[in-house]
Amino acid sequence: MGTGDGNLPHIVIVGGGFGGLAAARSLRHLNVRITLVDRKNHHLFQPLLYQVATAMLMPGQIAAPIRQVLKNDRHTTVLLGEVSGVDAAAHTLTVETPEREPLHLHYDFLVLATGVQHSYFGHDEFEQYAPGMKTMADATKVRNKVLSAFEAAEHETDPALRSALLTFVLVGGGPTGVEMAGAIAELARMSMKSDFRRIDPQDTKILLVEASPRVLGGFDPSLSEKVTQRLTHMGVQVLTGHPVEQIDDSGVTVGGEHIASRTVIWTAGVTPSPVARWLGCPADRAGRVKVRYDLSVPGAPEIFVIGDVANYEQEGKPLPGVAQVAMQMGAHVARVMEARLMNDAPPPPFHYVNKGNMAVVGRNYAILERGNLKLTGYVAWLAWSLIHVLFLALPNLRVSVFLQWVWSYFTEQRGSRLIVEPEISSSPAETVRSAS
Ligand SMILES: Cc1cc2nc3c(=O)[nH]c(=O)nc-3n(C[C@H](O)[C@H](O)[C@H](O)COP(=O)(O)OP(=O)(O)OC[C@H]3O[C@@H](n4cnc5c(N)ncnc54)[C@H](O)[C@@H]3O)c2cc1C
């Protein structure tokens, strides 16, 4: 496929997420042809997905059209399509595009930054009852499910069914589960407290279930403890040390006990996209590609794998699947490619600089860990808010999210309490009835 300037080296980047966009932006000053392929037309700011799922923000506030983000990068072409394979020997990849024959793109360098998708740890049957949260469609589905449960509870006369409708279970106590639990508690007890006539949203039960002994396993244990206390104070029941044994349309079974719930949300596990299979290269047990010191693939120095789909060990441990890692990897592979194109000395091996990890639990409370520095409470929450606004991909999104948050802070109201696809005929109450 031609993209103009046919004699220039062609760099193909697959994935317009945190890693792929960072690579594209870092390459913009080079005299090369860049093609960025993504199956979605937008870059999604996943750290704020839970705010869409809990009606704080509108979908359009956390997603930026990739074309718009890269519109000033004259050497970069954006291609909407899904990559289905790579022929490393022929230096080509196959891109499925809507209503066309597959395209075969030739590359001089290839950057694979296709991220992960949720995984049900071999229990795919859970998915129909417990949606995960990875895409905008997922978050909108969760929002519909949460808001529909309150609507159904309002006209439910059976106390047991009403209780199941007002019980929300989050499976997985990582940052997303913790953030969702806090946000649902505030939605019910603050934003909707006066909106219903027959139910009292204060009666909402929220359970956060985590298989390991503590929530937020990636943080220092003292911070996990503080977050557990905070959630408990907000009315969230934190159940640790118990894996979920069963999920069906009547609820979940945890530690042998059945919890009746109409709304179960999966915030537990992820699995990498099939890059290792495309390349036939070494991968870890999860399927992440084991990359070399310069983030290239063993035996294919012109192919780089970055972000959540890469396994890069630093200090004896693989780096975590977080946005910072993906962005720093994207910038690093750009430096490696530039050095090779310019016949310069290669940069030193990739080294991740951890600028701090954060999680938020409702308004006014977050945790921040950076080396030995551990912050909790209001100051951490301000830092969290500032950083999340600044890292949105476009200025209009930053302004829009900032204004929304200020308005919500003072009014305790949400930005988007819409059920977009109401399915009256299969309402949650009817499903609960048929399940009981
Ligand atoms: C709900 C949630 C909350 C999170 N919260 C935080 C947080 O608070 N802080 C933090 O640091 N990290 C957080 N993360 C993790 C962070 O979002 C990821 O680490 C980061 O997005 C990884 O970047 P990436 O570029 O590897 O992949 P992604 O950002 O996921 O981008 C992958 C891109 O590849 C595209 N793609 C995938 N397969 C194909 C294909 N076959 N063909 C074409 N395109 C394809 C996708 O459409 C997507 O645009 C969160 C993740 C989730 C899901």
Image: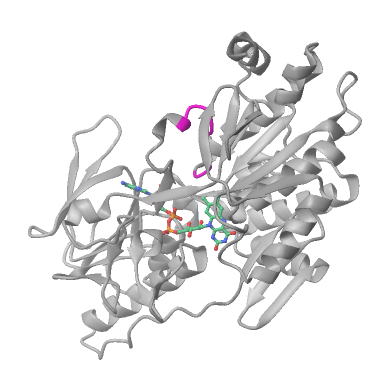
Seen as rendered, the residue at the extreme front is 256
104 to the left or right of 351: left
- Among the 4 quarters of the image, the one containing residue 331: bottom left
Magenta stretch holds residue 133: yes
Magenta stretch holds residue 115: no
Q: As displayed, is residue 290 above or below residue 428?
A: below
Q: Residue at x 20, y 52 (%)?
A: 278
How is the rendered protein coloured? one colour
Instruction: From the top left corner, tell me how far across and down residue 204 is, in percent.
Output: 79, 33
Instruction: From the top left corner, tell me how far across and down residue 318 is, in percent.
Output: 39, 70
Q: As displayed, is residue 208 above or below residue 311?
A: above
Which residue is more in the foreground, 104 or 354?
A: 354
Instruction: From the top left corner, tell me how far across and down residue 224 is, in percent.
Output: 67, 63
Q: Residue at x 45, y 58 (%)?
A: 70
Which residue is more in the foreground, 65 or 378?
A: 378
Which residue is more in the foreground, 355 or 65?
A: 355
Residue 61 at least partly seen: no
Residue 208 at least partly seen: yes
Seen as rendered, the residue at the extreme left is 89
| Span of residues in magenta | 126-134
239 to the left or right of 185: left
Q: Residue at x 73, y 60 (%)?
A: 227
Q: As displayed, is residue 73 above or below residue 370?
A: above
For the image, the number of numbered tags is 0
Which quadrant of the rendered structure holds the C terminus? Answer: top right
Q: As displayed, is residue 309 above or below residue 355?
A: above
Instruction: From the top left corner, tell me how far across and down residue 12 is, in percent.
Output: 27, 59
Seen as rendered, the residue at the extreme bottom is 345
Magenta span: predominant SS is loop
